[in-house]
Amino acid sequence: MSTKGLFTSFYTIVRKDVVRIFRIWVQTFLPSVVTSVLYFLVFGSFLGSRIGSVGGFNYVSFVVPGLVMLAIIMNSYSNTSFNFFTSKFFSRSIDEILVSPTPPWILIAGYVTGGIVRGVSVGLLVLLISLFFTHLTISHLLVVVSFFVLTALIFSLAGLVNGIYAKSIDGINIVPTFVLTPLVYLGGVFYSVNSLPGFWQKISYLNPVFYLVDGLRYGFLGFSDAPVAVSLAVLFAFIVVLAAVNWYLLKKGLGLKH
Amino acid sequence: MTSALVIQNLKKTYTNGVEALKGVSLEIEQGDFFALLGPNGAGKTTIIGIVTGLVIKTAGGAKVFGFDIDKEHEKAKAQIGVVQQEVNFNPFDKCIDIVVNQAGYYGIPRSVAIPRAKKIFDDLGMADKINERGLSLSGGMKRRLMIARALVNDPKLLILDEPTAGVDVELRRGMWDYLRSVTAKGVTILLTTHYLEEAEQLCNRVAIINKGEIIASGTMKDILGRLKKETIVVNLTKPVTEEILSSLSAYKPKKTDETAMELEIGEGKGLNEAILVLNQNSFQVESIRSKTGRLEEVFVHLTSDNNPDY
């Protein structure tokens, strides 16, 4: 296919997904909005004042980057995993792309871009809601934008691996519930890792989500537990590995072709 | 002239050990309306799956208009439009979006795809359905939508895997007319169907596959020419008697109704002679028809386990 043809194919996959995301906004946007309002009410208005400040910031300002990250991670992941799995397992409409000359890397790019659109959109909505609860400053805009997009990219890629490989709907639900949620909650969303005892600090450094939350916190508050360069390096490493896994799975047709 | 599809020694063994294809070779010329027939599980859909990239072959190869499905798979796929056996579109999407998106996957921009899709919908008699969602369509309309989707990339080879399954007679005949018009434009068609009358009506060449092997292949005329015996149903103007059944004993007569009987003709037992015997016994023939399609008779004989002389 020509470059123009490849772009048309990419645009078609993205357009289809974005139309779907906005068509079912009650399922794609609303749950994260409601959840974040509850978090801000509980940790901001009810508990925040009793906790005091962390790193010189009031508690609700401290948790905003973590909650934004939680929304981006969950939404970008579920978008690609669920969207790909349903098109593979229920409607079998994934065949429309598989029989076409669209190469695997365009399919990956299209699905992942859809995941980024949803992840970043929901992240921005949560950020908007946080303004009702706290005054927010952005210390490094470029870092914030980079972490928004790169995090959504990583978890869209991870969700796509899950969607391609899952053999049942349980396979789609297990990872977010038993892997992602614990990683996010133990990744420093609600506390500074530096406040943990030495052993648990070291364990936290093994958690990839810690670097995402910490990097975004640096972008907003100008304060982080780990150097932002390390966080970015971790992000890029995951992107390369996950993109390679996706490409391999699609090229081989694992979980897709008989 | 390059063949539309060449399949060479294609083999497929599924992970559960089922040997679906045992070395199938097939050649379809450009412009053919080719029927690939076989009982359930014979290997038809596996062949189509391999050619369209949905099934991974175990061995062998295939070329679509000269493009190797392994080495030049993108070019090979660009030549093909496929209607699969199962309904496989997102039922929540509008018909026009399903077809236009399919064009997009072939690199065709929306500005070209939208008018092309509308023309195909028009030709298929479903112009009023373009803004309806897939789930609201009847079974027959879903099949038409899948044909529209398969044609939007202007394929040179159209593969139809049981496109009229579950479609009522009127709609099916309408689809036949449409497919005839498609092949008249030079599009090569590979059709699998369980309606053998359909294959007999539409196709000029045919291959019969059974248990993963091609057991007969040739022009429709050649295949039908293999039929040595045929069962016909004769309707008479008066009740069938024991005497007339006895007079026609060479034709293995079977009374099926008060005024109807089945006769086996062929192998030196001509139809004219049978009618002559009836007339000599003061029986007038009201109508004659074949009990089943001729292709159906060939098919049944070829694919039955104890393949008798036919």
Image (tube, grey):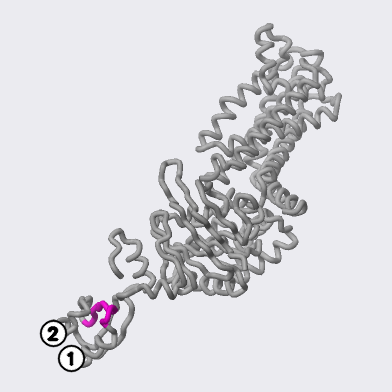
Residue at image location 38% in from the left, 75% down from the top: B225
Residue B132 visible within the image: no
Dominant SS in magenta: strand
Q: Are marks 2 and 1 in contact (CB under 8 Å)?
A: yes
Q: Which mark is residue B204?
A: none
Disc 2 is placed on an element classified as helix
Q: Which segment is the magenta one? A: B259-269
What kind of residue is marked 1? Answer: Asn
Residue A256 spot, x, y in % from top left: 55, 43
Residue holding disc 1? B281
Residue at image location 64% in from the left, 33% down from the top: A158
What kind of residue is marked 2? Answer: Glu
Residue A186 spot, x, y in % from top left: 65, 18
Please tell me which residue lies in front, B14 or B225: B225
Disc 1 is placed on an element classified as loop
Q: Does B91 appear in magenta?
A: no
Please tell me which residue lies in front, B10 or B38: B10
Please tell me which residue lies in front, B23 or B196: B23
Residue holding disc 2? B243
> Which callout, 2 or 1, points at the residue further toward the start of the chain?
2
